[in-house]
Image: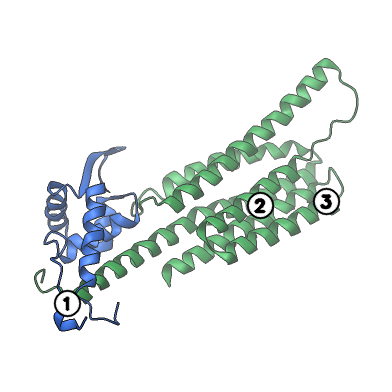
Amino acid sequence: MPDSMKTFKPLDPLLHSELRLAVMSILISTDSADFVYLRGQTGATSGNLSVQLDKLQQAGYIEVTKGFKGKMPQTICHITDQGREAFAAYVEALRSYIPSGKN
Amino acid sequence: MENNLSAENSLRIIAETIERSRRTITKNSGKPLILWGVLVALFSLIIWGLWTKTGSPIWNFLWFAMSAIGFVCMKTLFRNREKVPETEVSRMLGKIWMWFGIFATGFFALVWVAWGIRSLTGVEGTFSVDLTLIILLMMGLGGTLSGAVLGNKVVTASSLIATTFAALFLMVMPTGSPLRILSFAILGVFALIVPGIILQKQGRE
């Protein structure tokens, strides 16, 4: 099928964001990640990261557990099954945007 | 910026983020190996020196002190570092070395229990258990399995070759010689420090 005839799959708007996509990419390759680690890996500010994590949590893509490690507060994020499925679907949809021969 | 993400950019972000995270995890999994390798090599030399000087193998109990120092170092040296997440690989590595520690300590204690029972009950005959060789082989197996789990042929080969040479050195040295304890220094360097450095280097590349 020529590229011009190709149908583009809709991209999940929640994942189609640089920071949220980076967070999901980290969580897809690890079981869980701490807030500090996510901030360091993405280079985001604490405030922005908190907002984006909240959005992902509200969508059911991640679970956020708040607790303490010793006296230090700790926020751990896990990806959910729903999050894994959404991420897989997003990557699959991305493929439809890549011209044939490039993917 | 969010709305201007192209498909290529999205794929690039996914690939780069996963790769960066993988490198950080790889680099950090090398640090404990280096720490334990340095401790094993150092204590091997200390015990060899004290054993040679005093003629008493009692200094082997310093291995327990090494374990305690290692755990304290793990808690303090890595306390302030970026909390690195666990992956299936890092969890398996942790379990391999945790079970090595349990087996080595347990076996060491078991030998002393057996020796005590024999002494108390007056069992005759030579009591011969090559504790050094058994622990050395377990440690070599731990290093080789770590390399296999990491999918790193250099780490696997380094541990395997180090175990072979250390075991050979041990078998050639006369029984009861303090020199035998130096086999742990060989293994500490080549099964722990070298793989640790390799992992750190891979994480930086």
Which residue carries the number 3 mark?
B171
Q: Which chain is green?
A: B
Instruction: Report x, y in % for residue B77.
Output: 43, 50
Residue A23 in sight here: no
Q: Which amino acid, by three-letter code, is at mark 3?
A: Met
Q: Residue extending furthest right?
A: B125
- Crowding at mark 2 (Cα within 10 Å: few <14, some 14-19, many 20+): many
Instruction: Report x, y in % for residue B92.
Output: 49, 48
Q: Residue at x 40, y 64 (%)?
A: B23
Rendered image quadrant of residue B13: bottom left
Q: Residue extending furthest front?
A: A1
Q: Nearer the viewer, mark 1 or mark 2?
A: 1
Which residue carries the number 2 mark?
B140
Question: Which sits earlier in the primary sequence, circle 3 or circle 2?
Answer: 2
Q: Secondary structure at mark 2?
A: helix
Could you tell me which chain the residue with mark 2 belongs to?
A: B
In whole angstroms, how far apart are the C-alphas of marks 3 and 1?
Answer: 70 Å
Q: Which amino acid, by three-letter code, is at mark 1?
A: Lys
Quadrant holding the C terminus of chain A: bottom left
Q: Residue at x 90, y 23 (%)?
A: B124
Q: Secondary structure at mark 1?
A: loop
User: On residue A6, which mark appears?
Assistant: 1
Residue A65 in sight here: yes
Instruction: Report x, y in % for residue B31.
Output: 48, 56
